[in-house]
Image (spheres, rainbow, N blue to C red):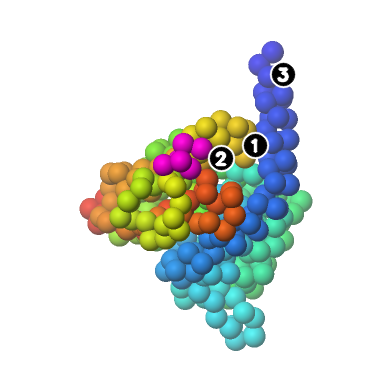
Amino acid sequence: MSGLYQHISSTYESICDWLFKLLWIVESERNNAKVDVYRKMIWPEISGNVLEIGPGFAKALQFLNHVTLNDGTFAVDPNTIHSYTALEPNPFLYSRLHANAESNGFCVQYDRKSYPECTEVDTLATRKNMVPFTIVRGTLDNFDKIPQAVLDGAPYDTVLTSFALCTAKDPEATINNIIRLLKPGGAYVFIEHVRQPPPGDPLVIEDNNVNAELWGKIQDWLNPVWKIIGHGCCIDRRTGETIANAQGWESVEYKNVRPVIDLQSRVMPLSFGKAIKAQDENYNQ
């Protein structure tokens, strides 16, 4: 009976992942139009050994530092980015993730332990001047279930999330695991949609005369339905505060924005910024 349940559960998850891909093809473009202006402010700071949680299609790779290589290829700067691990739980997003990574000059490979099916799509490049980009299937919700490829790559100079903590089953645990995987002094770069910050919040840099109290209540009311439609996406989380309140940071700097590009943006205000891990917080598995 347990085997049948697992089969049904796995099939259900696959269907949800596939439906989310269809939704994300449309929604990712809408989101990029709203958040790219803020990504451009902080993405160039990403460097070293990098781990991204929930990259989706990874269109934001274009905002990393790029150079023209000796062969004329325009690619991510290998002197800035040394390696890139993309931890993504939804395999239906891999084809576009793979294509975007290659278009930014990365050498793409798959972690076969977390995603055995990769033998059908793995097109690992062999050019030595390309930065390795490893696609790993999984999440950071539970440290004991983090794929070994992610642990083997630690500690990381930079960890980043972009619209990823909204779907984390346990955002506090995910943030704590990010801290564990960072090297001392390493940076966590993030941009996440959040519940409307309260009126008069000093961290809001773009208010746009949004009625924060009203739209915050609308977010609370919509969230149960939104979570179903959005494959677990929550629009009522105070993610900036959750990051800032985690133990293990040397500093946390972030800002809030109330976009008014469209009606949807009123239920998806943004928190974006950077947190630095304390120097005395060592990495350990």
> Do we see residue 110 in this rendering?
no
Q: Quarter holding the N terminus?
A: top right
Q: Which residues are magenta?
A: 213-218
Q: Amino acid at mark 2?
A: Cys
Q: Quarter holding the C terminus?
A: top left
Front label number (3 vs 1): 1
Q: Residue at x 62, y 79 (%)?
A: 74
In three-dimensional space, the C-alpha distance between marks 2 and 1, rounded to whole angstroms, equals 8 Å
Quadrant hosting residue 18: top right
The numbered disc on residue 229 is 1
Secondary-structure class at tag 2: loop
Q: Residue 56: x and y, percent?
A: 61, 52
Quadrant hosting residue 171: top left
Question: Which of these two is toward me, 45 or 41?
Answer: 41
Residue occupying the far left of the picture: 280
Q: Residue at x 50, y 38 (%)?
A: 219
Q: Are marks 2 and 1 in contact (CB under 8 Å)?
A: yes
Q: Amino acid at mark 1?
A: Ile
> Do we see residue 60 in this rendering?
yes
Q: Amino acid at mark 3?
A: Leu
In three-dimensional space, the C-alpha distance between marks 2 and 3, rounded to whole angstroms, equals 28 Å
Q: Is residue 228 left or right of residue 220?
A: right
Count all numbered tags in the image, as a single digit: 3
- Residue ID for mark 3: 4
In three-dimensional space, the C-alpha distance between marks 3 and 1, rounded to whole angstroms, equals 26 Å
Residue occupying the far right of the picture: 120
- Residue ID for mark 2: 233
Label 3 CA crowd tier, 10 Å (few <14, some 14–19, many 20+): few
